[in-house]
Image (cartoon, rainbow, N blue to C red):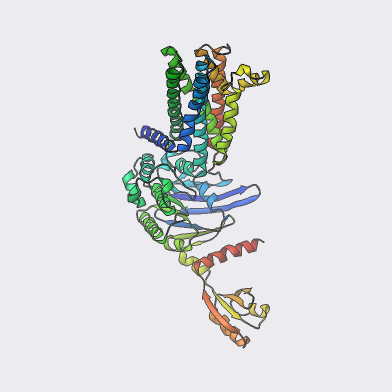
């Protein structure tokens, strides 16, 4: 039995008296795409840095292909199997695309050659252009190609489509799907929920250093299966909250927003109790809101 | 051998990347040459062209070594390029050696330029052996300055690096007697000069032309080696502690 590409158990990390990671467990199989979502400061970057051995954890362990990740110790054999695209990644501005590809491909024993990398980046027409003169999206594409330089079995992509236009983003998604088909395991952080919905087998929501939810995109949506009812009602807050299936109430200047997991029941009761209710509007929840809801509710609980 | 190939490519691409930075190349080559032309050739106060060849030679090799390491490593750190490389199977040695090779190439160009000006326009006459020893000494002498640059590059932000290097480079050159003979400095500063690697390097160079202060070479060599070892140890400590 071959070891999992990535296995994390009980990872914790504190900076001074701030808890950045509070016991994170992750197991990732070959050919699986894991999306890590979370607001800024959720611990995403720290988590990736610990997995890659750039930062030491306080406790817990990270295993890559069964091998223990021991701090920043250099394990070259392991690095042959990894591909990394960091959020802050900029190459030497003075080297051309083909020079960067030539240099990076020399690091790997069985990787792509420079021509293949230029092709992967889709920069055939810009091969002799210096990195500093590429557009933001082109830079991202080159960095993505370099992450694949060693034909890796495990790829880390930190906000890979930042600054890309729609077309470039879709083409990168296509490439990630191809990696998945080849059995490559992918860990991806993103702010774009559409990206997570499109690519992820599993989404992991990180907030305040804890995994507050995980599952397939569909499961996450189901976990937050509610709708919003906005209306102008003469009922007071207590009466509105007492309506069936109402989970939460938000007062706006002239209207009120009810969150319900059984919209029909709530509406029937509302109409029965308040004959003057006007401007009723029902809205479904987007994954984006589901995600915000998840992170906000855990933050609120802590306060 | 694929490892050897990585070392070669890394060195080659580091060199051309630096070579394509006019803001680095021009001052690195022009300053020592200009100073030497001014003070050693045009306004030469009789017979000090040979002395100044040694001191501006030291001044010339210090700059590129410190600037190349400090500025480029600080910038590679700031832009995440170094992190990407450290996460790749690239041997760290290839990265550092490439920067040293670039510094040595610049040192060699500066040495050749200064020697040519000295021989052609300042009428400096030395034996072949003296030219060669002097050139070898200046090349080997880049090491402690490269290590100082490495430490600064690992410590400073990319914005702070150039300023701090200048703040160290110029006073250190002056206090080591590279612009004025160290004997013209106040007594206290003359004693302080023993702290600077550039003082010991220039004394070794001046010994080749018989113009040194007369201390045994072993002192200067020993101190330079000791300083290099301490700097290397500190650089290694910083490198291993680096998180991003």
Furthest residue in direction front, as rendered = B42
Query: Residue B176 at x, y = what percent?
Result: 59, 22
- Image-quadrant location for residue B5: top left
Q: Quadrant of the image for the N terminus of chain B?
A: top left
Is A281 left, or right, of A198 in this rendering?
Answer: right
Quadrant position of residue B186: top right
Quadrant in which residue A245 is drawn? bottom right
- Horizontal side of A70 relative to A113 (left or right) equals right
**Where's residue B148, x and y in %?**
55, 30
Question: Is B229 located above or below residue A127 in the figure?
Answer: above
Q: Residue at x 42, y 21 (%)?
A: B116
x and y percentages locating residue B193 in the rendered image? 62, 21
Reply above or below: B41 against A23: above
At 44% from the left and 31% from the top, the residue drawn is B102
A173 or B37: nearer the viewer:
B37
The number of numbered discs placed on residues in the rendered structure image is 0
Q: Residue at x 48, y 21 (%)?
A: B138
- Seen from the viewer's position, the closer of residues B115 and A14 is B115
Q: Which percent across, then down, holds residue B153?
A: 54, 36
Closer to us: A260 or A112: A112
Placement of A247 over or under A53, stated as above or below: below
């Amino acid at each position: 039995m071959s070891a999992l590409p990535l296995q994390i158990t009980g990872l914790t990390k504190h900076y001074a008296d701030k808890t950045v990671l509070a016991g994170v467990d992750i197991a990732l199989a070959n050919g699986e795409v894991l999306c890590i979502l979370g607001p800024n400061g959720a611990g995403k970057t720290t988590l990736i840095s610990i997995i890659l051995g750039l930062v030491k954890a306080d406790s817990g362990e990270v295993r890559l292909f069964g091998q223990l990740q021991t701090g920043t110790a250099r394990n070259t054999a392991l690095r042959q199997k990894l591909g990394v695209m960091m959020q802050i990644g900029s190459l030497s501005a003075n080297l051309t695309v083909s020079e960067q590809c030539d240099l990076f491909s020399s690091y790997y024993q069985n990787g792509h050659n420079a021509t293949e990398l230029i092709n992967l980046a889709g920069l055939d027409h810009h091969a002799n252009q210096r990195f500093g003169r590429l557009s933001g999206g082109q830079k991202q594409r080159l960095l993505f190609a370099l992450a694949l330089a060693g034909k890796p079995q495990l790829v880390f992509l930190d906000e890979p489509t930042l600054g890309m236009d729609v077309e470039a983003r879709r083409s990168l998604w296509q490439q990630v799907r191809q990696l998945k088909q080849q059995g490559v395991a992918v860990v991806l952080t993103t702010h774009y929920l559409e990206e997570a919905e499109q690519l992820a087998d599993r989404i992991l929501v990180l907030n305040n250093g804890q995994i507050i939810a995980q599952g397939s995109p569909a499961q996450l949506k189901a976990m937050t299966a509610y709708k919003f009812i906005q209306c102008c009602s003469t009922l007071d807050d207590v009466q509105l909250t007492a309506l069936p299936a109402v989970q939460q109430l938000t007062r706006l200047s002239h209207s009120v927003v009810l969150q319900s997991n059984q919209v029909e029941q709530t509406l029937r009761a509302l109409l029965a109790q308040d004959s003057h209710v006007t401007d009723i509007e029902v809205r479904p929840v987007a994954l984006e809101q589901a995600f915000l809801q998840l992170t906000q509710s855990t933050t609120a609980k802590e306060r | 051998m694929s490892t050897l190939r990585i070392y070669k490519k890394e060195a080659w691409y580091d060199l051309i990347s630096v070579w394509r930075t006019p803001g680095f190349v021009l001052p690195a080559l022009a300053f020592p040459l200009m100073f030497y032309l001014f003070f050693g050739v045009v306004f030469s106060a009789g017979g000090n062209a040979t002395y100044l060849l040694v001191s501006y030679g030291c001044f010339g090799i210090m700059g590129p070594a410190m600037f190349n390491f400090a500025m480029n490593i600080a910038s590679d750190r700031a832009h995440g390029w170094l992190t990407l490389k450290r996460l790749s199977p690239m041997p760290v040695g290839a990265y550092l050696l490439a920067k040293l090779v670039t510094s040595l190439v610049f040192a060699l160009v500066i040495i050749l330029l200064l020697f040519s000006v000295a021989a052609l326009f300042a009428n400096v006459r030395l034996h072949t052996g003296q030219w060669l020893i002097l050139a070898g000494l200046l090349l080997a002498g880049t090491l402690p300055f490269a290590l100082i640059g490495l430490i600064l590059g690992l410590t400073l932000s990319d914005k702070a690096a150039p300023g701090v290097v200048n703040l160290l480079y110029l006073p250190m050159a002056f206090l080591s007697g590279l612009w004025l003979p160290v004997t013209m400095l106040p007594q206290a500063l003359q004693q302080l000069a023993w702290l600077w690697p550039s003082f010991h390097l220039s004394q070794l160079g001046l010994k080749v032309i018989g113009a040194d202060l007369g201390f045994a070479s072993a002192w200067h060599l020993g101190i330079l080696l000791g300083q290099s070892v301490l700097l290397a140890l500190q650089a290694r400590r910083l490198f291993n502690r680096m998180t991003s």
